């Protein structure tokens, strides 16, 4: 016969890009020329290696948010140059203005004269013109399919933020770059604002490389910083959620987060990237209490997870008697009062066979209680903890062996603590 003996547990408690295109084929879908058709999202790029590890987080996030996409078949081309049209489209998406392309009925005269490979591009240029990202004068020599230089992208971003007047006040600034003379005079203020005031674009090797075309990897980093900057004061799209991790089910690829409107569970797409401190991690690395940002795909599944604040994790070792394990709530209850002697947890019942007596039904057996049983009446039908010595002296009128009671406690008292079970506990 199995004996219920004192159990000790140590609980490690945890307190807890839409596709940027080069040719129209990248948009080959039923979208009436404006990029509104549905496409199937696939996560992960084969050509993101250690040479662009510095941009991996930004690439994954901007891709998940639809700011920038790949070329299909897991190809991103991080070193490829970004064209003027692509740079404008990305800026419009980050600023939340892409939908305004649908409101353009008649294209401005200056836009009609541009040579584009994709008809939908005219509407993006029209919105960019309306927002002051590009001027009518600049449209006269505008080549949308030409690679955009770093200083030109600086102009687009500063204007998108409505900071052109600030840039014009700094046109005579001395910039801390060895190649500052290579920056056109009418672009100095824009470069100053974006590098010195906003910190959205950086140089390297003490140079800004203004005449160098901006790569897709660099653009992803810039757009991610811009996205963070404009999101500070604005509500994000419906497919972007923030909340606190309540539970992670690694086996079923699910995550439950707490928000103001309550807890909700989401299915996580296979292979969805998880980032903690901008480092690539796995779903199992998330912990209860982590503050996260989720991006949902068109099917409502999570396609990107970023931990925006790691939970304060305190490791606590608890010694005591396990009184309950709730698999649905994923919690364990521990009676923490020091127990001397053998302890048994069970439900107290009364039996009148061969005289009135108490019985304790545990997980494995039934005991007839003898000894110090005064006061047990108050706990009939309740879960209690009994300290005592079992005696293998069965009585034909009594079911089970005897248990001499030395002390007893109600299981659900202030000395019983419930802990959430953390999947990473050991």
Image (cartoon, rainbow, N blue to C red):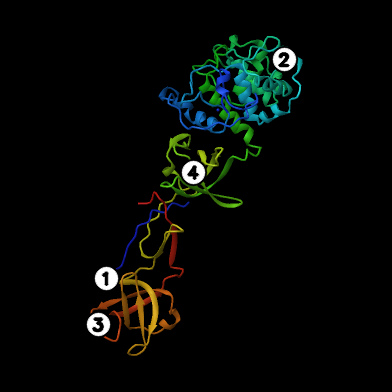
Q: Are marks 3 and 1 in contact (CB under 8 Å)?
A: no
Name the residue carrying label 1: 3
Quadrant of the rendering where the N terminus is positioned: bottom left
Mark 2 or 3, nearer chain start: 2
Q: Is residue 135 left or right of residue 59?
A: right
Q: CA distance from mark 4 to mark 1?
A: 43 Å
For marks 3 and 1, give the one nearer the viewer: 3
Q: Are marks 2 and 4 in contact (CB under 8 Å)?
A: no
| Closer to us: 45 or 167 | 45
For marks 2 and 4, give the one nearer the viewer: 2
Locate residue 352, reporting x and y percent.
Answer: 37, 88
Locate residue 312, reporting x and y percent.
Answer: 48, 48
Q: CA distance from mark 2 to mark 3?
A: 99 Å
For marks 2 and 3, give the one nearer the viewer: 2
Q: Residue at x 52, y 29 (%)?
A: 58
For marks 4 and 3, give the one nearer the viewer: 3
Q: CA distance from mark 4 to mark 3?
A: 57 Å
Which labelled disc corresponds to residue 310? 4
Name the residue carrying label 2: 112
Q: Is residue 166 above or below residue 304?
A: above
Locate residue 223, reporting x and y percent.
Answer: 58, 27
Mark 4 or 3, nearer chain start: 4
Crowding around mark 4 (Cα neighbors within 10 Å: few <14, some 14 to 19, many 20+) is: some
Mark 2 or 4, nearer chain start: 2
Q: Is residue 229 above or below residue 350?
A: above
Name the residue carrying label 3: 394
């Amino acid at each position: 016969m199995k004996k219920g003996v004192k159990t000790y547990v140590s609980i490690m408690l945890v307190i807890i890009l839409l596709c940027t295109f080069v040719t129209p084929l990248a948009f080959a879908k039923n979208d009436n020329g404006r990029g509104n058709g549905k496409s199937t999202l696939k996560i992960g790029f084969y050509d993101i290696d250690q040479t662009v590890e510095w941009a991996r987080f930004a690439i994954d996030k901007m891709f998940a948010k639809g700011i920038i996409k790949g070329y299909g078949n897991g190809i991103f081309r991080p070193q490829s140059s970004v064209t003027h049209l692509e740079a404008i489209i990305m800026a419009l998406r980050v600023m939340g203005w892409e939908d305004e392309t649908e409101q353009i009925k008649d294209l401005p005269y200056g836009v009609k004269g541009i040579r584009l490979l994709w008809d939908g591009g005219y509407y993006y240029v029209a919105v960019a013109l309306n927002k002051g990202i590009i001027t009518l004068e600049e449209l006269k020599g505008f080549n949308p399919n030409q690679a955009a230089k770093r200083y030109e992208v600086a102009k687009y971003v500063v204007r998108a933020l409505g900071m052109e007047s600030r840039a014009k006040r700094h046109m005579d600034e001395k910039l801390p770059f060895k190649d500052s003379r290579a920056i056109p005079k009418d672009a100095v203020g824009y470069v100053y604002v974006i590098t010195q005031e906003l910190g959205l674009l950086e140089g390297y090797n003490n140079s800004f490389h203004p005449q160098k075309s901006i790569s897709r990897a660099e653009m992803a980093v810039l757009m991610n910083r811009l996205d963070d900057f404009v999101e500070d004061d604005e509500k994000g799209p419906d497919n972007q959620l923030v909340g606190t991790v309540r539970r992670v089910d690694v086996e079923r690829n699910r995550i439950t987060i707490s928000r103001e409107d309550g807890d909700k569970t989401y299915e996580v797409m296979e292979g969805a990237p998880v980032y903690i401190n901008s480092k690539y991690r796995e779903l199992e690395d998330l912990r209860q209490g982590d503050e996260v940002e989720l991006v949902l795909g068109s099917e409502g599944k999570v396609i990107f997870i970023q931990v925006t604040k790691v939970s304060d994790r305190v490791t606590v070792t608890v010694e005591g008697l396990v009184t309950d394990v709730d698999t649905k709530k994923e919690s364990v209850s521990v009676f923490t009062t020091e127990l001397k002697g053998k302890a048994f947890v069970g439900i107290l019942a009364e039996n009148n066979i061969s005289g009135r007596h108490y019985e304790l039904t545990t997980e494995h057996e039934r005991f007839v209680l003898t000894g110090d049983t005064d006061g047990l009446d108050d706990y009939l039908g309740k879960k209690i903890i009994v300290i005592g010595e079992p005696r293998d002296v069965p009585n034909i009128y009594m079911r089970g062996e005897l248990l001499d009671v030395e002390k007893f406690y109600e299981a659900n008292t202030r000395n019983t603590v419930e802990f959430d079970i953390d999947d990473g506990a050991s």
